[in-house]
Image: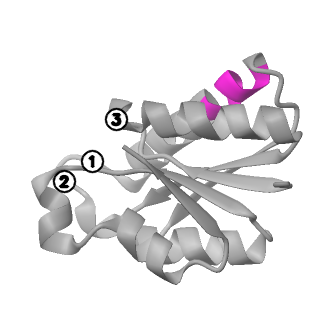
């Protein structure tokens, strides 16, 4: 039985399947759904500000919250934070007693250069991790 499920989101459409899975599990288990967006300040492009990224992050977690509420999940916690994605996800999960982390896997060149966030989380988390393709 899961009580707290975390779905990190980056606002991209390729996380949709992971979002769907996390919402379904939270609804089935009557769990609290935690959604988070991590702003990686190292990835700021020219012309983009922290305020822009915070707005994007807020929209991403509100999207998950709205979808979850429509599916009958009545406990949704939202977090927009700054830091390295993997470390931030692991820290949030530990600090909030998360039972399950549901993540999408990105198959882009970027993860070959920097390493896969989902692999780092799966390798280091104390909670169970479900990686959705």
Above or below, 73 against 92 in this view is above
Asked if residue 60 is among those painted magenta in the image, a careful observer would answer no
Which numbered disc covers residue 14? 3
Q: Closer to the camera, 38 or 22?
A: 22
Q: Is residue 54 left or right of residue 13?
A: right
User: In the rendering, at what x and y percent does residue 6 appear?
Assistant: 66, 54
* Label 2 with label 1: CB-CB less than 8 Å: yes
Please tell me how crowded label 2 is: few (under 14), some (14-19), or many (20+) other residues with Cα within 10 Å. few
User: In the rendering, at what x and y percent does residue 35 appear?
Assistant: 64, 48
> Mark 1 highlights which residue?
48
* Label 1 with label 3: CB-CB less than 8 Å: no
Please tell me how crowded label 3 is: few (under 14), some (14-19), or many (20+) other residues with Cα within 10 Å. some
First along the sequence among labels 1 and 3: 3
Identify the element where label 2 is drawn. loop
Which numbered disc covers residue 127? none
What segment carries the magenta color? 64-69
The kind of secondary structure the magenta stretch mainly shows is: helix
CA gap, disc 2 to disc 1? 6 Å
The residue located at (51%, 82%) in the rendering is: 124
User: In the rendering, at what x and y percent does residue 26 appear?
Assistant: 77, 40
Which numbered disc covers residue 45? 2
The residue located at (82%, 30%) in the rendering is: 73
Q: Which quadrant does the N terminus fall into?
A: bottom right
Q: Closer to the camera, 86 or 30?
A: 30
């Amino acid at each position: 039985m899961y009580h707290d499920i975390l779905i990190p989101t980056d606002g991209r459409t390729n996380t949709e399947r992971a979002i769907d899975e996390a919402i379904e599990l939270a609804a089935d288990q009557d769990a609290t759904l935690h959604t988070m967006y991590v702003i990686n300040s190292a990835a700021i492009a020219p012309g983009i500000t922290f305020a822009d990224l915070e707005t994007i992050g807020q929209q991403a977690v509100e999207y998950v919250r709205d979808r979850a509420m429509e599916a009958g999940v009545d406990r949704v916690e939202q977090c927009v934070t700054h830091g390295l994605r993997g470390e931030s996800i692991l820290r949030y999960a530990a600090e909030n007693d998360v039972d399950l982390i549901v993540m999408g896997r990105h198959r882009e060149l970027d993860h070959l250069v920097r390493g896969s966030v989902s692999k780092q989380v799966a390798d280091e988390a104390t909670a169970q991790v479900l990686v959705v393709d």
